[in-house]
Amino acid sequence: MNTQPTSDHVHRPSHGIPEIVLEIEGMTAARGVEAYLVGGAVRDSLLGRTPKEYDIAVATDASAFAKLLADQAGGHFVSLDTERDTARVVIPSETDPVAIDFTHISDDIHSDLGRRDFTINAMAARLDGVAGGEWDVIDPCGGRHDLGRGEVRAVKDDVFRLDAVRMMRAVRIAAALRFSLNSDTAASVQRDSNQLTNSAPERIREELLKTLAESGARDSIRLMDRLGLLSQVIPEIDQARDVAQPKEHHWDVFNHLVETVGFAESILDDREGDDLVSSMLPRFDGMREYFASEATDGASRSTLLRFTGLIHDIGKPASKTLEPSGRIRFFGHNEVGAEMAGTIMGRLRFGRRGIRMVKTMIQHHLRPMQMAATGKLPTKRAVYRYFRDVGDPALDTLYLNVADFLAARGPELTEEGMAEVSSVISHILKTEYRPEPAVPVGKGLIDGNDVMNEFGLESGPEVGRVLSAVASAEAIGTLNTREEALTMARELLESGGVSA
């Protein structure tokens, strides 16, 4: 343990601390409760960053105090761990809600900090000092020293054996702060990595998604792999190691997956640049807001795209074939991969919406560039069918396709290659599309009664298939009148083109 001073007086303004946190000080003072701001909020404030999380340690019943705050502030109370007496209060806000975690100080604040994960998280400041802008930082483990070194260091050697998910948190914090991992701490992670699977799948999923949400996600995945964590979280990915690909690919399957994460991040970075991707990638209005919106399990569409990139070709090893000519093929790997993704995500307790989105994206990730012959652009009908079939994650899948292409070419990407993929994606984005038929079936140019009366049919699947085909043609502008719709319906019925 570092022998730094246990308290270091520092003046810091409190304008970056939410008002509700400052109001809590009044509640604790009125009740004579000793209270401290601890962990990440202290760390981030010392770094000049706006904290994303707020932890308050109180020398009283933490859950009871949290319930009291929730009642007074109109917040939502969540019990996190009854045995350890930890609870969360989510306070509504006009912008983002504020989540405050409360923990119970069992002995004293120094002992409490000594049981935390990393030295830079094992610092505290009295809440009354925070409210007044005069912080006395309590730092028994040398956290400020490690902040200065830019290093994530475990408080003790056994922190990962006490809570294995902390190993993933070490990677995430290092990525978020752009810090390095202390060598002894890294060795401890490698030693204990096989303990990770004993943790709750939900917590593993949460840490993985948080890691993927940070900038430099590809490097974080590389670090997870070097430490032995990636194989514990997604053991199926080990099958992709050293699996060769056709000559069009720069990397083997495993490295292609990891690189796709990086390209998925880079193509959603809307900062202007002079590289091929930044200068030529087509974008759409509202793209930033779209990918920032929540997809599943608290993760944004951007984060889910990176996760999908990590496993999008997970089915390749199982579907690999080698032709007599020596040509490598992966027939049906998208279908195999979609099923494997469902298994992986089910094991990590992803929500049903997220599983459905990822499986759909993987199943269709090749489709955008296969909708027309090389050098040609997809027809309006093909674009319509794409959005109809893929549905909700259709836009996400377009950019997964781009990230997949870029990770295939890697450093061998040419301007001609980028121009080709950009022209197709741009054309798809500019082509009028609707995920559903332009006019709901039964309310378009013709409805079910029209078909049955005109052609003497009984209600049944055949009528529905006719209406679906007519609605599709109407949506892309092929049909404009009732007479044209009836003519198409007649032709379909006479030719037998409406079979299931």
Image: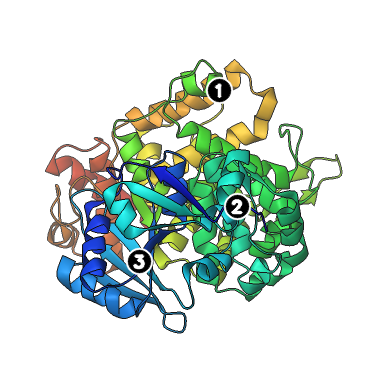
Give the quarter of the image for residue 35.
bottom left
Gap in Å between the C-alphas at discs 1 and 3?
57 Å
Crowding at dot 2, Cα within 10 Å, few <14 / some 14-19 / many 20+, comes out as many
Crowding at dot 1, Cα within 10 Å, few <14 / some 14-19 / many 20+, comes out as some
| Residue 265 visible in the snapshot | yes
Q: In this view, does 356 lie above or below 174?
A: below
Circle nearer the viewer, 1 or 3: 3
Give the quarter of the image for residue 449.
bottom left
Residue at 59% across, 34% down: 405
Q: Give the x, y percent position of residue 428.
A: 39, 32
The residue to which callout 3 is attached is: 35
Q: Is residue 193 left or right of residue 354?
A: right
Q: Give the x, y percent position of residue 83.
A: 46, 84
- Could you tell me which quadrant the N terminus lies in? bottom right
Looking at the rendered structure, which numbered label has been put on residue 142? 2
* Count of marks overlaid on the render: 3
Label 2 near label 1: C-beta < 8 Å?
Answer: no
Q: In this view, does 15 lie to the left or right of 445?
A: right
Q: Is mark 3 on a helix, strand or loop?
A: strand
Q: Is mark 1 on a helix, strand or loop?
A: helix
Circle nearer the viewer, 1 or 2: 2
Instruction: Return the residue nearer the eye: 267 or 340.
Output: 267
Crowding at dot 3, Cα within 10 Å, few <14 / some 14-19 / many 20+, comes out as many
Disc 2 marks a residue whose amino acid type is Gly
Q: Give the x, y percent position of residue 427.
A: 39, 27
The residue to which callout 1 is attached is: 418
Mark positioned earlier in the residue sequence (1 or 3): 3
Q: Give the x, y percent position of residue 257.
A: 65, 45
Gap in Å between the C-alphas at discs 1 and 2?
49 Å
Give the quarter of the image for residue 245.
top right
